[in-house]
Image (cartoon, rainbow, N blue to C red):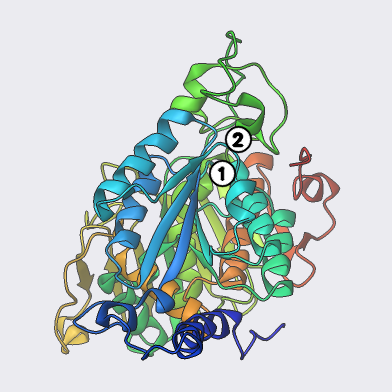
Amino acid sequence: MVEMDLKPEFTTMRSTRRSFIRKAAWLAGMPAIIPASVLGRNGKVAPSNQIVVGGIGIGPRGREVLKSFLSQTDMRFVAVADVQKSRREIVRKTVNRHYGNEDCTAHGDMREILDRKDIDAVLITTGDRWHAPASMLAAAAGKDVYSEKPCAMTIEECRELDEAILRHKRVYQAGTQRRSVDNFRAAVDLARGGKLGKLLTLHAGIIKPEDDKPDLPGEPEPDPEEINWDRWLGPAPVRPYNKIYVGGGWRGHKGLAAGFKVLEWGSHTVDLCQWAADADGTTPVEFEADDGTIHARYANGLKLVMRLAGFKGEGDWLGLGTCPVRFEGDQGWVEAGDYGKIATSDPALLAGGMPAAMSGTDASRHVRNFLDCVKSRAKPTCNSTVARYGHVACHASAIAWKLGRKLRFDPTAERFIGDDEANAMCSQPRRAV
């Protein structure tokens, strides 16, 4: 494991800016009178202490996360890159309206943002295919990364992403924000704290897995200034343009979306189960699918069940919201969902009080955790290694569902045992970006 740098360049850089202001004033023979706003008085954060952020591929979900960034006073959002002109203009105008100026710039190529020396971190909310490649490019450029999920398209890409973040000593936060939402955290605390007794079964809500959809019929490509189709595809295989893809209808298509829909919710709910099981550095060792339900088992015998929840709460769930999880021990159980609700087998388990109601899609505290770690160089709650193993568990589950047979898995080698067909699905061709 690579340790994070204890002398962060972020702190050094910001200190240098402040020192420069004072030295410049002294050399000019002038008293070092600096506006209070520059030094961070009167409730303002000094520019020298602000984290400078750029955005890559910010669509509807990305704009929701962006709101959480813009609400933070120690952060300044300065640029957006998107291959679709209409989307980057929406973000540019939103940010400039927020700040009351025209400082935010819009770009058609992410490299224009990654090349900027003043940008400390990037928010990546592209489609699945770009999450890992863009994150690795950003890390190589010295940027810290907040990336939406699924964070990687394959088991191999999960490993590559984690290794790149560690190698470049960057702060990385996966957008699995439910780790920062109170009712989910309370449920995990009960499981990890032994309040449920010995854990027996973890339940993760997923939507129904589906096979890849056929390619859409080709249409004339748009002007690259409006939509750069080749850059939109990025690492994905070449295919004919269709406006449905760029309008959000890329999900479910091979090379564009990850894991036969298992990762749509599983990247959140399996992540929470991994956390509850204290298994952030490993995965289950067996996977077997039964229609829409996927059964897994950890080396210590703990069971993980990925079962249908759906947007209408299908299955034997309590109706506490989308992306539900349930942890069962030999002395009790707890269940939580996206409506900010939590239920337990015994009210005494929540003797300390009910957690504050908070939507499971609210990224505000998750963003705050990321920004704090950019400053401290600590590891965020959903750092690249945490994301790696939770995602690998989801990908292995999806492969077991696709092949329709029980698979044994080695968490250390991140390979299936004695199954060449399954191992061939641990990676996929990727175009150079």
Nearer to me, 212 or 407 = 212
Whole-angstrom CA distance, mark 2 to mark 1, is 6 Å
Residue 203 location, quadrant: bottom left
Which residue is pictured at 38% across the width and 81% down the height? Answer: 191
Q: Which percent across, then down, holds residue 386?
A: 57, 71
Image disc number at residue 216: none
Q: Which percent across, then down, holds residue 7?
A: 61, 90
Q: Are marks 2 and 1 in contact (CB under 8 Å)?
A: yes
According to the image, label 1 marks what residue?
128
Which residue is pictured at 14% across the width and 84% down the height? Answer: 353
Which residue is pictured at 63% across the width and 51% down the height? Answer: 134
Residue 314 visible in the snapshot:
no
Which residue is pictured at 22% across the width and 76% down the height? Answer: 345
Q: Which percent across, then down, holds residue 101?
A: 29, 50
According to the image, label 2 marks what residue?
256
Residue 305 visible in the snapshot:
yes
Image quadrant where one finds the C terminus: top right
**Residue type (three-letter) at the residue carrying disc 2:** Leu
Mark 2 crowdedness (10 Å alpha carbons): few <14, some 14-19, many ≥20: many
**Residue type (three-letter) at the residue carrying disc 1:** Asp
Relative side of 377 to 423, left or right = left
Tag 1 or tag 2, which sits nearer the N-term? 1
